[in-house]
Amino acid sequence: MKRPQSINGLAAGAAVAGLVIAAASLAAASSAFSGDPVRGQALYKGCGGCHSIDDNDIGPRHRGVVGRRAGSIEDYSYSTALKTSGLIWDEVTLERWLTNPSALVPGTKMFFKVDDAQSRADIIAYLKEQK
Ligand code: HEC
């Protein structure tokens, strides 16, 4: 389900901040944070040294990545490990990937990790919007 943009608005955010924190602790227990795409867009700058939404760079371009088979951009040169991983990028696989790419796909050439779970969820929420 696509959440209306206004839920992520500042006013709504402030009003339900307490609730959001409570929800986040609950979500932590079930390891499913709900992401904020606006915060995710800001955090995505950290990926920008290697990635962009529309152009291949050190890493592959990201438009449409959610729902895509891993290692499937034709004009990007992936590691064999990622190309043959058989993964489909969704919230679960991306969460594991950003936690530790080498643990999910031994032999990958991406070594960048995002340590904070909420930040991972926010980045994934942002990527979901880049269809
Ligand atoms: C230091 C460079 C670097 C940074 C920073 C980096 N990546 Fe990557 N990323 C790569 C490389 C290189 C690959 C290709 C990996 C391979 O072929 O094994 C990759 C691959 C990926 C893929 C797989 C895409 C596909 O088409 O299968 C995703 C998703 C991804 N990165 C997300 C991110 C996100 C989100 C961030 C920021 C939180 C990020 N990366 C930060 C270098 C980087």
Image: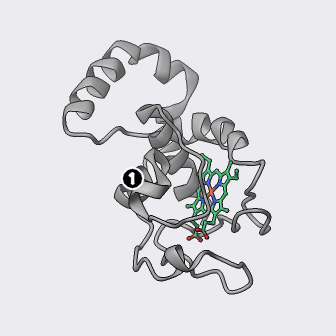
Residue drawn 77% across the image and 69% down it: 56
Figure quarter occupied by ligand 1? bottom right
**Foreground residue among 17 and 88:** 88
Instruction: Identify the residue under disc 1.
Output: 96
Image-quadrant location for residue 57: bottom right
Locate residue 67 relative to residue 48 in the image: left or right: left
Q: Nearer the viewer, residue 107 or 82?
A: 107
Q: Quadrant of residue 43?
A: top right
Could you tell me residue 58's position as x and y percent?
Answer: 77, 62
- Residue drawn at x 68%, y 86% is 74
As shown in the figure, which amino acid type bears the numbered disc 1? Arg
Q: Quadrant of the N terminus?
A: bottom left
| Residue 40 in picture, x, y percent from top left | 58, 40
Q: Residue 121's spot in the image, x, y percent?
A: 45, 42
Residue drawn 69% across the image and 68% down it = 60
Find residue 73 and report its image quarter.
bottom right
The residue sitting at the front extreme is 107
**Residue at disc 1, secondary structure:** helix
Image quarter of the C terminus: bottom right
Q: Position of residue 123 (x, y in %)?
A: 55, 44
